[in-house]
Image (cartoon, rainbow, N blue to C red):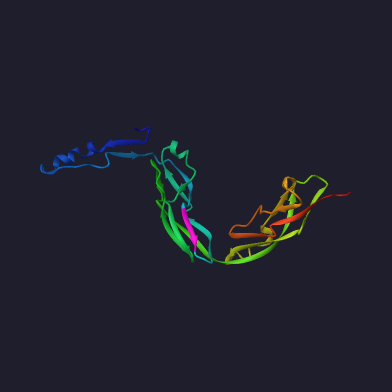
Amino acid sequence: VKSSGYVSILTSEITRETFEKLNVATKVVSVKPDTVEYFYNYGTYVKVPVVINGKITADSLYAVGDTSISPQYAKVYASRELLDTLTRVYTKPFVLEKLNKTTTHTVGLAKIRGAKIVPEKIKVTFDADLVTENTVQVPVEYINFPAGKTLKTFPGMVSVTFHVGMKRFREVTADKFAIVVTYDEVMKSSGNRLRLSLKDKPRGVSHIRILPEEVEFLIEDNVE
């Protein structure tokens, strides 16, 4: 028992004496559970991050921005074998819908058999921000081209339109986006047109549109 950190006791063993003290006219129909389990250790624990397991949606014209968890980490007490498999703990599933203001929600952490989690509950705060639309001009860049070759696209700059919360409006500038074309993509294209896609974008933006979605291109040989 000492080495396993686990004890299992039949309920019948615990309740036998209790049954004997009952009135003879009393009839016990059932006892649940039929087995009581105890898990123990000697203070062995790991500290792991808490991960949100929830469905969070914002009201129309709003977006869920910054999210904070308090505390961000939980202590898990268990056997060394179990602790070696843990990298995180999750909240119990929850749903928060149509957020239109900063909202704090208390939620329990999902139980793990054979483990004790401290704390049992955490607080999550979601910042719902009013959404606006913005457009920036982003250059089309190219990478992994052979030496002596360059790419020209027509146009060389495209419009990127997106939704962003008012609190981040000034933070999201054109240099936070990247539209990059590789040499392999050019070689695989049919004709002289390329379909563009974002290779990088800032957090907190949504409903992104690129105009035009396709550009004409020309590969030039550099003359030294």
Number of numbered discs: 0
Give the quadrant of residue 152. Answer: bottom right
Q: Is residue 56 magenta?
A: yes
Q: Main secondary structure of the magenta part?
A: strand
Q: Is residue 20 above or below residue 204?
A: above
Residue at (59% x, 63% y) in the render: 164
Residue numbers of the magenta segment: 54-58
Q: Is residue 11 magenta?
A: no
Give the quadrant of residue 175. Answer: bottom right
| Front residue of this view, candidates 91 and 97 | 97
The residue lying furthest to the right in this view is: 224
Indicate the position of residue 195 as horizontal and vertical percent values. Answer: 70, 53
Q: Quadrant of the N terminus?
A: top left
Residue at (68% x, 63% y) in the render: 136
Q: Position of 15 compared to 112: left or right?
A: left
Give the quadrant of residue 39. Answer: top left
Indicate the position of residue 149 as horizontal and vertical percent values. Answer: 81, 48
Indicate the position of residue 26 as horizontal and vertical percent values. Answer: 13, 44
Q: Position of 71 compared to 144: left or right?
A: left
